[in-house]
Amino acid sequence: MDNLAHSLVGAWMAEAGLKRYTPLATATLVIGANLPDVDGLVTFAGSDASLYWRRGWTHGVLALALWPFVLTGLMLLWDRHVRRRRDPTLAPARAGPLLGLSTLAILSHPALDWLNTYGVRLLMPFDGTWFYGDTLFIVDPWVWLLAGAAVVMADARTRKSMAGWWVLGLATTALVTIPPFVPWPAKVLWGVGLAAVLWLRWKGTRVLSTQRVATVCGVGLVLYLGAILLGSQVAAPRAKAWLTAQGYPVERVIAGPVPANPFVRDLIAVGPDRYHFVRADFLRGGEAHLQRSDPSLPREPNPGPVIQAALAAPHLRGLAHWLRLPTYEVTETEAGWRVAINDVRYSRSLSGGLGFAVVELDKSLRLLPPRRGSDHEH
């Protein structure tokens, strides 16, 4: 998930009552909810390095066991050498509660990351297997709304903080209301939710306590995740039966989310040698709720030597390990072979997008240097 979602979930946990256990509780929860993403620094090393390292070591079981102690130690050092040095009258932070809060916040991070189709390697460094929840899109404004309601209610007390929340509210509203693929019921629901947040902020604790609002929103978030997961579990077998009835053999169906629209699923049906793409719209009745969304693409369950040589290219080490639903386009050239690689989770045009790369090989399947102007990056 995006770091705004992680931050809001950490702040939501604080407003739900956890901030009362020790000084620095809120900061610990917000930092801990983002801490595994320190691997984001590898993005500066290039896109393939990002695919190779992201959601790996720092998100794996070994790091998850160590991070709480690291964060607790850092917070105690900050408390002793900065916070209480500035004001010796402040109550000291408590190590035990800080460790518990650090653990909870840090574990929330891979739990959220698991929910989307990108994947997370929970067993690193012992096992590099990717795990997928296939439930939420990487950026989900509904998570922002539910996790952020109590945070806005508690935090928007100064002009600066209110201005920041207004900017965020307008940006997320544009994300939901402007795109044509978001149906009007979702837009109306978003408007009602945003109006409720504004009303709670205006009325303040005279109507409901922040902790009660956080509790209600937490229940709502769990119900939302459950509804999305249930929708995917319902849509996948229906799509498989629908395609099978049309004569397309299907081995399995992956039901993924679409941006900002909880009423639709993007279904990828994996056949013996083709990928088929289906859109499931729960606002439509009968058979009409299933439609073909994109032309089918070839699948190579047993890639030949040309594709294997392309995947062995040193600059595609990260991509080769990250691919989940790859499709390839192999073209013979004067010099040898051109191989376009793509992952149909994120792009279906073989012309760009996350996970796209082009490799050129000579007739002996040795890597050729990239030509100027060609797309060899993903």
Image (cartoon, helix red, strand yellow):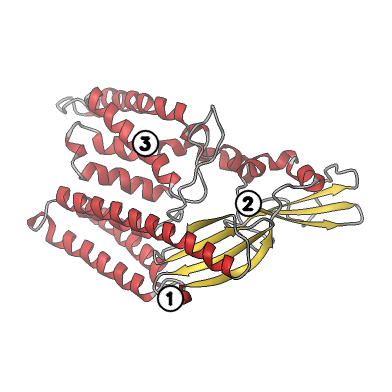
* Residue 59 appearing in the image: yes
Q: Element under label 1?
A: helix
Residue drawn at x 42%, y 30% as measured from the top left: 64
Residue 320 left/right relative to 117? right
Q: For the residue marked with disc 2, what is the amino acid? A: Gly
Q: Say which mark, if any, is on residue 4.
A: none
Mark 1 and mark 3: Cα distance apart in space:
41 Å
- Residue most toward the left? 206
Q: Say which mark, if any, is on residue 355.
A: 2
Mark 1 and mark 2: Cα distance apart in space:
35 Å
Residue drawn at x 90%, y 47% as measured from the top left: 363
Between 104 and 170, the residue placed more toward the observer is: 104
Pick whichever of labels 1 and 3 is earlier in the sequence.
Answer: 3
Q: Element under label 3?
A: helix
Q: For the residue marked with disc 1, what is the amino acid? A: Gly
| Residue named by callout 1 | 286
Number of marks:
3
Residue 322 left/right relative to 161? right
Percent position of residue 268, x then y: 56, 59
Q: Nearer the viewer, mark 1 or mark 3?
A: 1
Q: Say which mark, if any, is on residue 107.
A: 3
